[in-house]
Amino acid sequence: MNSISTEAPIRVRIAPSPTGDPHVGTAYIGLLNYIYARQRGGQFILRIEDTDRTRFVSTSEEMIFDSLRWLGLNWDEGPDVGGPFGPYRQSERTEIYREHADILLKNGTAYRCFCTAEELDDIRKQQLAAKLPPRYPGTCRRLTPEQIDANIAAGKSYTIRLAIPPHGNDLSSSTTFRDELRGSITFEHGNVDDQVLMKSDGYPTYHLANVVDDHLMQITDVIRAEEWISSTPKHVLLYKAFGWQVPRFWHMPLLRNIDKSKISKRKNPVSLIYYRDSGYLPPAIINFLGLMGGGMPSDFAGGDGVIEKFTLDEMVANFVFTDIRVGGPVFDLAKLKWLNGEYLRKLSPEDFFLAIRERVFGDDYLRQISALMQNRIETLTQFGDMTGFFFSDNVLPPQDTWVPKKRTPEDTLAFAQDQLAAIEAADWNHDALDASLRKLGEEKQWSVKENFMLLRAILTGSTMSPPLLESMIVFGKARSLDRVRRFLEAQKKLANQKK
RNA sequence: GGCGUUAUGGUGUAACUGGUUAACACGUCGCCCUCUCAAGGCGAAGAGUCCGGGUUCGAGCCCCGGUAACGCUACCA
């Protein structure tokens, strides 16, 4: 297998998908790529992988840019800064993927598949029921040129699939690649499915777009999360089908929840927006992420002599990639908080004041809150009476304020869980939230009053507050969701203690 | 179910090419300081390295076999 030349100028990339809030995992992989490039005088590229139009969120891309910049992970090429290998947004490169899919069609390493989603679904269900691994049966792989032409003439839509060997040009029965952290990994081709490369909507899947772009953008090192290991053989086969050199692969450990599952918003705040809005400092987040998986000398102490405390620059100078350990590290908020406190205390009094003024008492934030308060108070100093929850993190309501008169605590908690799902799925504006909550109330037979009052108690810690929905909008989605989650978690803990 | 990866105190990491009572950081607990809470100082508890074999004078490090967790198993990334 021909691999990338060791002399090639280093080029790495992160490729987030704009499907929601910028994720802490993106920051982690971004940090690693950034360090790798800076250590080697290479280029760090940001590419937006927006090929899934069903999950596309229009505000997401801008949030990704903002939060990565906020963390100080600046990229050399990207959709917003340009560069010689653009465009850097995959939705603007569809023509390129189409041309490349054609190449594969012509050289026999890919084929058109006319199976419908329903057919495939049925087959998968049957296979699963028979305890067989779900696999594309290769129906369309055996189509004759005449049948294909007939299907096309009939206007049938199709996808393009990668033909996993053995086939005409390639009789190999397995693919082996090197993972720089784990050594060589082999997959038997019998275990690799004929991956869809081009969807019927004309957009490529991750696999095609990623390989084509990485090649065209001359990426030398693919540093990505561990979840991609299983699809790497497909990628290697794609490079081979095009006759291209394979990059180096570095699969990084997956950040975990406390229960060791892959980090998720169900169990952890994962949105970078949350961390920013909650008053975490970029150097603390960077430092903490740098502790995940190792790589820094374990006894490293930064400028003020605190062990395990270091800056981005110190990471560039001292981080050793081959020292990364591959067991998935638990993302432990307690340690992040400790670090954040460390950085907060080291701020000059003036900088600390400035930080408070910007984050906690920012004009924008205060203006919105004061708008909610103007006709609710009679002296200015009453302002604080109803707005404490906007500025405090610790707002657990006592049980007699959150359990409605005719409900049990258990029912109430269950309903709160539903509320969380409802507001999570809703667009963050008054009408959408209102509709979503009211709909839930109707389904579960909760009155609007009970419904809103419960959420108010959870979010504000009180039964008295400015209008709920308006308050939530000002308070922000990331923090609101986290507050409800933490409430539920705290109640669960309490319930367990009673047992 | 199949395939792949991983496995050191509660959490994150150490332990040179196998070599004294497995180290550090966070967290927890206690004490000091103190009007309170932090911060700071001092101290403690907590793992015998997933389990079972093997090699060796000696294994967390090597070999074999299990187990568990996690990931993938989509016209999502």
Image (cartoon, coloured by chain):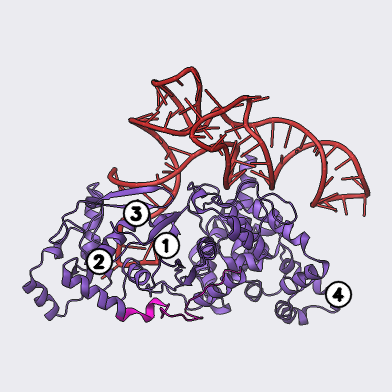
Chain colours: A purple, B red
Specify whether residue A402 is painted magenta. no
The quarter of the rendered structure image containing the C terminus of chain A is top right
* Three-letter code for the amino acid on which mark 1 is drawn: Asp
Q: Residues within 10 Å of mark 4 (few under 14, many from 20)?
A: few
Same-chain status of marks 1 and 3: yes
Q: Inspect the image, locate mark 4, and give the three-letter code of the amino acid beneath it.
A: Thr
Toward the viewer: A294 or A494?
A294
The disc at residue A230 is 3
What numbered label is drawn on residue A243? 2
Horizontal side, residue A161 vs residue A265: left or right: left
Start-end of magenta stretch: A72-95
- Mark 3 and mark 4 lie on one chain; the one further toward the N terminus is 3
Report the disc number at residue A221: 1
Q: Position of residue A380 (x, y in %)?
A: 85, 78
Whole-angstrom CA distance, mark 3 to mark 2, is: 21 Å
Tell me, yes or no, whether the highlighted magenta stretch contains residue A87. Answer: yes
Q: In the picture shown, does residue B70 fall above or below A196?
A: above
Where disc 2 sits, the SS reads loop
- Judged from the image, the secondary structure of the residue bearing numbered disc 3 is helix
Q: Looking at the image, tell me whether mark 3 or mark 2 is earlier in sequence order.
A: 3
Residue position marked by numbered label 4 in the rendering: A381
Q: Is residue A9 visible?
A: yes
Query: Which residue does the image show at 41% across and 80% down from the upper left?
Result: A86
At horizontal 21% and vertical 73% (from top left) the residue drawn is A103
Q: Earlier in the sequence, mark 1 or mark 3?
A: 1
Between the C-alphas of marks 1 and 2, the distance is 18 Å
Please tell me whether the stretch drawn in magenta is mainly helix, strand or loop.
Answer: loop
Toward the viewer: A449 or A172?
A172
Q: Residues within 10 Å of mark 1 (few under 14, many from 20)?
A: many
Contact between labelled residues 3 and 1, with CB atoms less than 8 Å apart: no
Q: For the residues carrying marks 1 and 4, which lies nearer the camera in this image?
A: 1
